[in-house]
Each structure stands twice: as structure tokens, then as C-alpha cells.
């Protein structure tokens, strides 16, 4: 019988595994494939950088990739508009970032890699966790379960039948780089998705991606590529390196977040803690993990109310993001903002020969 079982070792799971008291017997299950990060742009936001700094952690240089980014190119296909905006992201290798966070976990935590949680069942002393590894089913028991398993969270699905969150499919393709771009591109097209799409360069690769409604997601992605080729982006099927995908949440309602109950706790995206405007989730993952670790280190059992109360600041921030969302995704409001030129960068020197 473990004291705590953590399902998932992304930024949320790895952070809480590092911060939990060594007085607890802790198990962590992680399903990740070696050298594969989450299907996302792989940018570290200023909020996430701030939390790493508060942990007194310095990012290893091998986690970073070229080029580093000073601006985002915003393409509004609905209104045929373009703007550049200054941003302060760090361009990183997401797989190496996750691996680095896992490397910080103390050896007292038992980690089972390439293990997929299949079922969680209530028992007298806590919970029975069934997981699959190498086509075999195993079980472990724990007094407390922490769900850090993202938008397709089996932990959340076990206990939460009420707070349904709109789920999207994130798809991206990596191409051998033909022309490295020093900017991150955000693309808005309401015919493709009511979220957004992106392009970004990472070392020798050019990435095209987007978050799409589940229906016809592949066709939507193919249409995105067609639009980008019309815009002059260079990538070809012959230079396709890999294709990847995952589920992401779009937390666009006031009741999207759910922190857990009955000694099951949710952190990061599994709790719905992801920005509805930018889909940024790393900062919320690490912050919610820190809060839960503080709560559990004081009292292991029956602390759901304390955790929920202490995440109020995060939940308020996410509600503010919901208010911000229409200015990005409503094409009329977005047109007004972009045509105003507010905070936009004027490109200079591009015609010098």
C-alpha cells in the first residue's frame, strides 16, 4: 500500500513528485515514449519561467533550441490581417524539458515508466490502480491518488461525471527545415477551429500544428497546411519527419476546473488548469503541484477542501483568461484589436538589400 500514487509525469506530476515529503511512500506511473514530448509549440512562457525561478531552478542549456524568439507573427485568415507582437518565450525541446523535470525527482519515489493507467477502483483503505505495461496488467494500491494525466485524464473521468470540458485534438507535423524562421506564428481561422494554429522552428525542423475540434480534425489540419503554403511557408511532404497528436482541453466555461474529491486530487490540465486563450498550461501545472504538495505534506488524508481553497488564485486567473478569449477568437473583436495596431511591432529593415 503506497501513501500516494501519481498518474502522469509531465510538468505537474514531476513537480509534485519532487516536492512531496520523503515521509510518504510514493508511486509514479508515466506512459511517455522516450524522446517524445507533448504535442505543443514547446514554448516556455514568462509565467512558467517565473515559477521555475521561485523554485530556484535554472534551465539547462541542452533543453533550449534555436532560434530563440522575440516576436509572434499573428495571421488572421478571417480578416486577411497580419501583425507582429513582441513576446518573451523560451524556445525549448519539450521532451528534454519533461525529462529534466523527471530527473529532479528524488530516488525515494518509485517510478514505473511506459505504464498506462487503465482503471481506478475505490477500496476500503484507498484506491486500487490497474495499469498496463508491455501488454500485461498490474495493480497497485494507494491511500491517495493524484491525477496529472492531462486532457484525457482517466483519473478525472473516474470521479467527475459533471464538469465536462470541451476537448480538442492537437496535431503537429515536423519537417526537415528548409527556411528557419525567427518568429512563432499564430494563425486564426474560424473555418478551421475556434482555437488557434501555429508554426515554429526548432533547430533543424519546421513545425506546423494546431488544436482542432474532434470532428474532421485531420481534414482541418490538411486545410491549414494549404493556407500556409499560400502564405509562402516552405515545407514539403518529402521532408516530413514525424507526425504527432494528443488531446487538449479548451476551458472556456466558468466551471471547467475541478480539483478532485475523496482523496483523489487533480493538478495541471487534468484539473482543467490551462489557459483558454493561449492554451498555455505549464505554469498552472507547476503552480497547482506546488500548492497540493504543501497541503499534503501537512495532512495526507481528507484535504480536498484545503487544496480547492488554496487554488482560488489560479482559478480566478483562468476566469480572466476566459474574459480575454473573445478578443482573440471572435473575428470581429480580433479585427478591431489588430487594426488598432495596439502593442504591435513595426518591421524595419526587411527591404534592405
Image (cartoon, grey):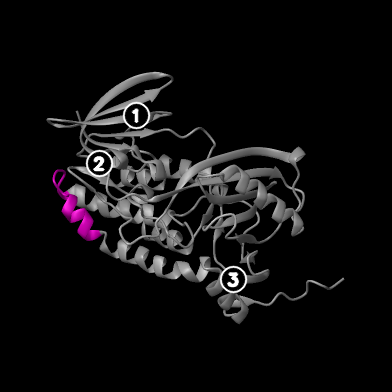
Query: Between 244 and 7, which is closer to the camera in this rendering?
Result: 244
Q: In the picture provided, is 98 more to the left or to the right than 178?
A: left
Nearer to us of marks 1 and 3 is: 1
Label pair 3/2, CB-CB below 8 angstroms: no
Whether 349 is drawn above or below 304: the answer is below
Residue labelled with disc 2: 159
Q: Give the extent of the magenta segment.
A: 298-310
Q: In the picture provided, is 89 more to the left or to the right than 166?
A: right
Q: Residues within 10 Å of mark 3 (few under 14, many from 20)?
A: some
Nearer to us of marks 3 and 2 is: 2
CA gap between label 1 and label 3 equals 43 Å
Q: Can you give x and y, in whole percent of width and height, for residue 217 in the image?
A: 56, 45
> Dot 1: what SS?
strand
Q: Can you give x and y, in whole percent of width and height, for residue 65 in the image?
A: 61, 51
Identity of the residue drawn at 41% across and 57% down: 283
Residue labelled with disc 1: 118
Q: Is residue 133 visible?
A: yes
The main secondary structure of the magenta stretch is helix
Q: In the picture provided, is 92 more to the left or to the right than 9?
A: right
Q: In the picture provided, is 182 more to the left or to the right than 105?
A: right
Q: Earlier in the sequence, mark 1 or mark 2?
A: 1
CA gap between label 1 and label 2 equals 14 Å
Label pair 1/3, CB-CB below 8 angstroms: no
Identity of the residue drawn at 59% across and 74% down: 335
Identity of the residue drawn at 27% across and 55% down: 291
Residue labelled with disc 3: 86
Q: Earlier in the sequence, mark 3 or mark 2?
A: 3
Q: Earlier in the sequence, mark 1 or mark 3?
A: 3
> Dot 3: what SS?
strand
Amino acid at each position: 500500500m503506497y501513501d500516494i500514487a501519481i498518474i502522469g509525469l509531465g510538468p505537474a506530476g514531476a513537480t509534485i513528485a519532487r516536492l512531496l515529503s520523503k515521509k510518504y511512500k510514493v508511486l509514479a506511473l508515466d506512459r511517455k515514449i522516450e524522446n517524445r514530448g507533448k504535442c505543443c509549440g514547446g514554448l516556455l512562457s514568462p509565467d512558467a519561467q517565473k515559477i521555475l525561478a521561485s523554485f530556484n531552478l535554472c534551465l539547462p542549456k541542452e533543453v533550449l533550441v534555436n532560434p530563440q524568439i522575440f516576436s509572434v507573427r499573428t495571421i488572421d485568415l478571417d480578416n486577411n490581417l497580419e501583425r507582429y507582437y513582441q513576446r518573451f518565450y523560451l524556445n525549448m525541446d519539450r521532451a528534454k524539458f519533461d525529462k529534466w523535470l523527471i530527473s529532479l525527482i528524488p530516488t525515494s519515489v518509485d517510478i514505473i515508466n511506459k505504464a498506462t493507467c487503465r482503471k481506478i477502483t475505490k477500496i476500503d483503505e484507498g484506491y486500487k490502480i490497474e495499469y498496463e505495461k508491455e501488454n500485461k496488467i498490474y495493480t497497485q494500491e494507494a491511500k491517495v491518488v493524484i491525477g496529472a494525466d492531462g486532457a484525457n485524464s482517466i483519473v478525472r473521468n473516474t470521479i467527475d461525471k459533471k464538469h465536462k470540458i470541451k476537448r480538442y485534438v492537437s496535431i503537429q507535423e515536423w519537417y526537415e527545415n528548409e527556411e528557419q524562421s525567427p518568429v512563432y506564428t499564430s494563425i486564426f481561422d474560424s473555418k478551421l477551429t475556434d482555437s488557434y494554429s501555429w508554426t515554429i522552428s526548432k533547430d533543424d525542423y519546421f513545425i506546423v500544428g494546431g488544436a482542432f475540434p474532434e470532428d474532421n480534425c485531420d481534414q482541418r489540419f490538411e486545410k491549414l497546411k494549404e493556407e500556409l503554403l499560400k502564405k509562402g511557408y516552405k515545407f514539403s511532404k518529402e521532408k516530413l519527419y514525424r507526425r504527432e497528436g494528443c488531446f487538449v482541453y479548451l476551458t472556456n466555461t466558468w466551471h471547467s476546473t475541478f480539483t478532485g474529491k475523496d482523496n483523489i486530487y487533480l493538478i495541471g490540465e487534468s484539473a482543467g488548469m490551462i489557459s483558454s486563450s493561449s492554451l498555455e498550461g505549464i505554469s498552472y501545472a507547476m503552480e497547482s503541484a506546488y500548492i497540493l504538495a504543501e497541503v499534503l505534506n501537512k495532512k495526507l488524508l481528507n484535504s480536498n477542501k484545503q487544496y480547492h481553497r488554496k487554488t482560488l488564485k489560479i482559478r480566478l486567473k483562468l476566469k480572466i483568461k476566459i474574459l480575454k478569449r473573445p478578443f482573440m477568437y471572435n473575428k470581429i473583436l480580433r479585427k478591431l484589436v489588430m487594426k488598432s495596431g495596439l502593442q504591435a511591432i513595426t518591421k524595419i529593415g526587411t527591404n534592405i538589400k
